[in-house]
Amino acid sequence: MIADEIVLSFPNITRVTMSKVLEYCNIHGAGADDETRAFDEQFVDVDQKTLFDLVLAAHDLKIKMLYDIVGERTGDMMKGKTPEEIRIIFNIGENSCVDDHPLQKELNPWAFE
Amino acid sequence: MALNFSQRPIFPAHTSEDNMVSPMRIVNGEKGGHDELRDRFGPRREVVDRGGSPDSVSKDIIDLLPSDPFGMDIDISTTFTAITGWFGDMELDYGDYMRNTFVNHKEDYGLFAGFSFFWNSALKFQSFPTNLMFHDQHNMDFNCVLVTKSEESVNDFATCPDVIGGDPHEAFVLALSYLGTKDLLAVERVCKSLCSTIHNDSLLWRNLYIDQPLNERITDDVLVQLTNRAEGNLQCLSLIKCPKITDDGLRRVLETNPKLTKLYIPGCTRLSIEGILNNLKAFNSNTETAGIKHIKTGGFYGITLDHYELLNNLLGIQKNNYIPHYYHRANSYQPCDDDRAIDVEICPRCQNLRLVYDCPTGSCQPKDHCRACIICIPRCAECGRCVHNSEYEETFSLEYLCSECLKQLPRCQEPHG
């Protein structure tokens, strides 16, 4: 017996991202093992835009496992980098969003001696 | 300049399933293009028509431009894309394809046409039973339609932003919780909005972990400053080999962070056992605090049995559940996951209060007799096995390696000749 039609609307998630999320969920449905670990490594090896889309999708859909691996991967892209390098990699303007904080360059000088 | 017209007809008569590219290029790819289509073909009429509709050919300049002059196989889409069924579990029957029905399919097929559907349109989607895959393996049969956000145009006409640097992406901010302290402080310097976010988000500062290279630089004042960012929600404080932190600094941190339960201070040479005990007494007796439940000292110099008993009392330990603890060069200062209340214990051999290790399974018989501090029983820095009963070598870094681990070390190549 076929039940009524169900419409699931995700105005913030693109088709491509959703298909990747579904792929992840299908693979991990049976639990973690070596295969899923290998799948995860290859799964997060994507370009920045796709990775960001996956982070947002996992956050919205509250899929913790997926959120952890893509979030960690995004974090890995920032680890060990100087502020200037991070600006270049992620295309961030130095003075975005006006705020009354002190000059960024002078923040926490003790950490960068 | 002569235009290089494509040889493809504007509406190909036989579009294969693998090549549903509309020659009606929507250059800007977004709603503007869509409106253009609606004007041409009337509301809610599909652009790509398998049967071909030559009467709709327009003489607009866009139609005369070549569809793919650089052979880039560009994807095109506009506004909403409706998806029937679930990906990865469907086999679509293209023999039943009907006019005015759009069936989207896996990315494997590459290009797809640009056109829009509205969910409440009069068009009837071909629907079929499908299986849903959930985490709990619950299978149901029902029709399901996923409506997702439109794809952004992937063509090169629109990708290069004119602005040199913009705001950080929302996902970037979500990933901050995966960064350590040093990286958080570096990201704080990237731009003002990130600075504000990192400074004000107390969740990022709930677990403070200070290790190389910040450990040598951090002072009492800086520590208090950083712990204040948690706004009283600091739960775990790890100071690994921080020589500048004093008892007074620790006292100030404890005064302003009543929710602290885990304190890891191995290798902080200016902290004395008496100072720790005094701070703990004051903190744990305060009714507003739950009290420290876990402390890792890394083996405090000068700790006596009396100190140990007092610590046990302060932490409210009834009886330590015995969990084997193995030696490795990396974990001597790392917070362990074993959730023990105190890391030191009485060494069964020398009766001093030190970190006590067990022998890994199967390597020593009887196992219970091979339990002692690292001074009584030296161990392999790699696998944790005791070395006095087997072959071992002392390396240049003054650590022991058993014969098995020695074999796995990368060796320099022997020089030829």
Image: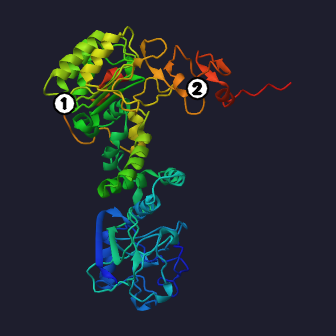
Judging by the rendered image, the residue that carries numbered circle 1 is: B232
Q: Residue at x 38, y 66 (%)?
A: A15
Label 2 resides on the chain identified as B
Place residue B198 in its image quadrant.
top left
The answer to whether residue A87 is seen in the rendering is: yes
Residue that lies at the very extreme toward the top in this rendered image: B302
Judging by the rendered image, the residue that carries numbered circle 2 is: B385
Question: Upstream in the sequence, badge 1 or badge 2?
Answer: 1
Q: Is residue B233 above or below residue A26?
A: above
Do the residues at discs 1 and 2 belong to one chain?
Answer: yes
Q: Separation of disc 1 and disc 2 at Cα?
A: 43 Å
| Residue A41 left/right relative to B47 | right
Q: Residue at x 51, y 17 (%)?
A: B374
Q: Nearer the viewer, residue B245 or B318?
A: B318
| Residue B184 left/right relative to B383 | left
| Residue B23 left/right relative to B317 | right
Badge 2 element = loop
